[in-house]
Each structure stands twice: as structure tokens, then as C-alpha cells.
Amino acid sequence: MSPSLFNALHLTKVFGALLVVACHYAGHYYQFSFYSNGTGCFFIVAGYYALNWEHSRGLHYLVKRLLRLYPAYLVAVVAYLLTQWPPVSSWPALLFHHLTFLLTVPDKATVFALNPPFWSMPVFFTFFTLVAFLPRVTPRAWQVGALLLVAVATLKTPLIEWHDGYIELWVFPLHLFAFWLGGLIGHVAHRREIKPSKTYSWLTLALMGVIIACGFFYQTFLELTSEFSGFYFRGVMVLLFGLLFWVVLHSHLTVRSSRPLAFLGTISFGVYLFHNLPPMWLDPVVSGVGGMAAALILSILLAWGSWVLVEAPLLRFCKPRLARWMSAPY
């Protein structure tokens, strides 16, 4: 992978994580609505990796993905349980549903019982499961368009209300186009020489500004439109994230390697999972701007600690053993 592509992926992940943090901290510390569907950035990046960079398939691929998802996720689940301390009688059910990536939840409320960002875990899991058992495919623009049309058509059917919105937890039919878009962008980028341009650098900053501005007007948009407009909004944001990934690839912002960017990109998934914990701990002590800054710093430290103490050691231990296991003759 070229350094510029590597940096573009990191920048996209960091931007997505910051949007998710802003969404929750804006309401918690300032009581106003901000939402830009930052999770869509992670869908784009996951689609790029799965459909371009990964060569393994089948059980090998699925176990590799679980090794990346599960450790930090389980640490986060336990941390939120211990922090919120729901009635002990509810612990077995909560643990069971979260251990199964929330695919067994009886209602939508259970998905958000511990931490709202956990809703995306079943989406990632069902996507990785789908990819594991698909033949290698080359993403095409018409496929992205077709999947987008399927998502829009689904909003017009009773499926959207199935099991109190349970269909939102599956990658298909509502989210698969986002992953496919990331795969398409990666496929096109790999086939052509990328020449960084200052114009694209300015476009990157302008597009980030547009995405942030959309986040501020999300609530107003909902109030002026139909009940399903939130789904359309999220779809539009995913398309903007795809465009952002493309212009970032062609900008000067990712030409040079950056250790801070690489660090934040590596732990961005952890920040996504842990950032709602610090406000719970810090609220009795500090609030306002100071509380938000402290919560953000603590979120980064938690994500870094999870990476250094849990995720990276487990990956180092399991990956070579997994490779030997999968290559062993039967």
C-alpha cells in the first residue's frame, strides 16, 4: 500500500471518529443536536480493505476480522457494564446479546442500552460474513448504484419497520452500498497513478466543512421533511464520505507520513467505542469546555491502552498461529 493511500485511510477514519465524538459530546455538554453519520466513514474504509486489500476468504478471513473487532469491543462492553451498573438480573441477557454482536436483541432499545455506537457492530459482522463466503469480486459503479437503489426501495416497504428497526443492524439492504462504494474507490485508485494537487487539498478542507455544516442542520432537516428522511440523510452523507475519500487520495494532505495521524488512525476504532465512557466518569467533577477536553483526551488514552494492552498483543499472538492453522493440510 502506498504511503499516500495509507495516510488517506487514516485521515478518513480519524475524521469519522471525530464526527461520532462530536455527535455525542454536542448533546451531552452543550444540549444541541449535531449528527453527520460519522460511522459511514468506517463503512467506506472497511469496504476498501475487504474488497481490495484482503486476499483471504472463507473462515480464515472471518476469523481475522473477528480478531480485529472482538477484543476492543468486549473490553468496551465490560467497561460500560461496570460503569452504568444496570440491574444485575439484566446482565446475562445484555452480555449474551452483545457477545452475539446484537443480532439476537429482542428490540431496538437493547441495542443502545450500553453504548449507542455499538449499533454498527452487527453491520460490520454481517458484512464480513458476507465477504467471507463470496467469491472475489471487482466493485463496479453500477453495483454501487444498484445497491443504493435497493436501500432506497427498502425505505418504501414495511421491511424498514421489521422487528422495531432490526433490519438496520444488517449490512443488507440498507448499508451494503456504503461498503461497496469504498471498495469501488479503492479499485479505481489502484488502477491509476495518483498525482497530488493543491486543488484537491482545498477541496478536501471545503468538503469537510460541508459535512460538518450538514451535521449542524440535521435536526432542522428532520423537522422539515418526512419520517424516513433520516435514512436519506445518512445515505447522502455516505456519498459525501466517499467523495471525501477520493479527494483526500489526490490531495497533498496525505503525501508525507505523519506519526500523529498514523497513531490516531490506528486507535480510531477504540475512540469510536470508548468515547462515551469519560463523560460518565467526569460529570461529577468537571463540565463544559474543560469536561469535554478532558473526556476527549481520556478517550484517546483509553483507546491507546486498549490497543497496546489488549488488541495488538492478541493480534501478534493469534495471526501467525491462524496462518499456520489455515495452511495446515487436512
Image (cartoon, rainbow, N blue to C red):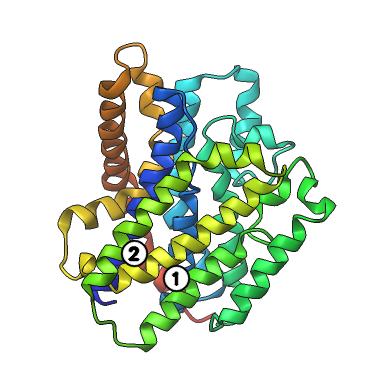
Query: What's under tag 1, amino acid-wise?
Result: Tyr
Residue 231 point in image, percent of width and height: 64, 50
Q: Residues within 10 Å of mark 2 (few under 14, many from 20)?
A: many
Can residue 317 be seen here? The reply is no
Q: Is residue 241 above or below residue 31?
A: below
Q: Quadrant of residue 281?
A: top left
Q: Is residue 16 left or right of residue 254?
A: right
Give the quarter of the figure containing the C terminus. Answer: bottom right
Query: What's under tag 2, amino acid-wise?
Result: Leu
Q: Is residue 92 left or right of residue 210?
A: right
Q: Regarding mark 1 in the picture, which secondary structure is present there?
A: helix
According to the image, label 1 marks what residue?
A: 48
The residue furthest front is 224
Which of the pair 91/109 is nearer the observer? 109
Q: Are marks 1 and 2 in contact (CB under 8 Å)?
A: yes
Residue 158 point in image, percent of width and height: 84, 51
According to the image, label 2 marks what residue?
A: 9
The residue that appears at 26% across and 29% down in the rendered structure is 293
The residue that appears at 38% across and 80% down in the rendered structure is 189
The residue furthest right is 158
Q: Which mark is residue 195?
A: none
Q: Is residue 286 above or below residue 189?
A: above
Q: CA distance from mark 1 to mark 2?
A: 9 Å
Can residue 80 be seen here? The reply is yes
Q: Quadrant of residue 173?
A: bottom right
Sequence-wise first label, 1 or 2 = 2
Q: Residues within 10 Å of mark 1 (few under 14, many from 20)?
A: many
The residue that appears at 32% across and 17% down in the rendered structure is 287
Residue 79 point in image, percent of width and height: 43, 30
Which of the pair 218/135 is nearer the observer? 218
